[in-house]
Image (tube, rainbow, N blue to C red):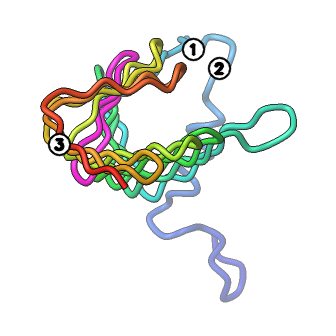
Amino acid sequence: MNFGNKNLCYPNGNFLHSLCFLGMQDFYSIDIKPYSLNFKNIEANQIKAYELNSSLVRTYYSADDWVRFEDRDIFQNVLMLDYDYNVSANKLVFMDKNISLAGNVLYKDITDTSISTERIFYLKDDKVIFTDTKFKAFRANDTLFGSSLKYDMKNKTLDIKGVNLWLN
């Protein structure tokens, strides 16, 4: 159709084809099926998350990258600032209820206990962290070096093996 110099049809007749297609549809006979989405992999960058309770921010989480697989989540360059403790690491792997942290792992809590190592495992239900790699731990003014460590976060007890101790 041409009215003067104005063409009312879109190029290639796409608009007309769309109108014809919609005009011929019988919407009552369309078979709509609910589809459940199951993402096997998810990726995200620059993650910032907050855990809130009724009165304050309980925990702040940040990570540069996050990849979710079917059986685990992997975070890169992680920082967790909790009310009771702070943790940072190059990599965090969350599988089931267990967490492993690797690469420049730093842990510090409100009782002035801090731990520096290359790998730590965290049992979330038991509130226990442990490592079987060389570590450096600080408690108040004392410095401890050792080969394996288990720290009960509920009772604030530290169990160390293969220790060298520097007391101040």
Image quadrant of residue 107? Answer: top left
| Residue 74 rendering spot, x and y as whole percentages | 30, 38
Point out the frontmost of discs 2 and 3. 3
Q: Identify the disc placed on residue 164.
A: 3
Q: Considering only order in the chain, which callout, 3 or 1, is on the residue closer to the N terminus?
A: 1
The local secondary structure at tag 3 comes to: strand
Q: Which mark is residue 26?
A: 2
**Residue at 85% of width from left, 32% of height from top?**
54
Read off the magenta span. Answer: 91-104
Mark 2 vs mark 3: which is more N-terminal?
2
Q: What is the chief secondary structure element of the magenta stretch?
A: strand
94, 79: nearer the viewer: 79
In this rendering, position of residue 93 left or right of residue 62: left
For marks 2 and 1 on the same chain, the one whose residue lies earlier in the sequence: 2
Question: Residue 3: image x %, image y %?
Answer: 71, 79
Residue 9 in view in this figure? yes
Q: CA distance from mark 2 to mark 1?
A: 13 Å
* Viewport quadrant of the C terminus: bottom left
Residue 18 seen from this side: no
Question: Which amino acid type is shown beneath numbered disc 3?
Answer: Asn
Graded by Cα atoms within 10 Å as few (under 14), some (14 to 19) or many (20 or more), the crowding at tag 3 reads: few
Pick the front one: 10 or 145: 145
Q: Quadrant of the N terminus?
A: bottom right
Q: Which residue does the numbered mark 1 point to in the structure image?
A: 32
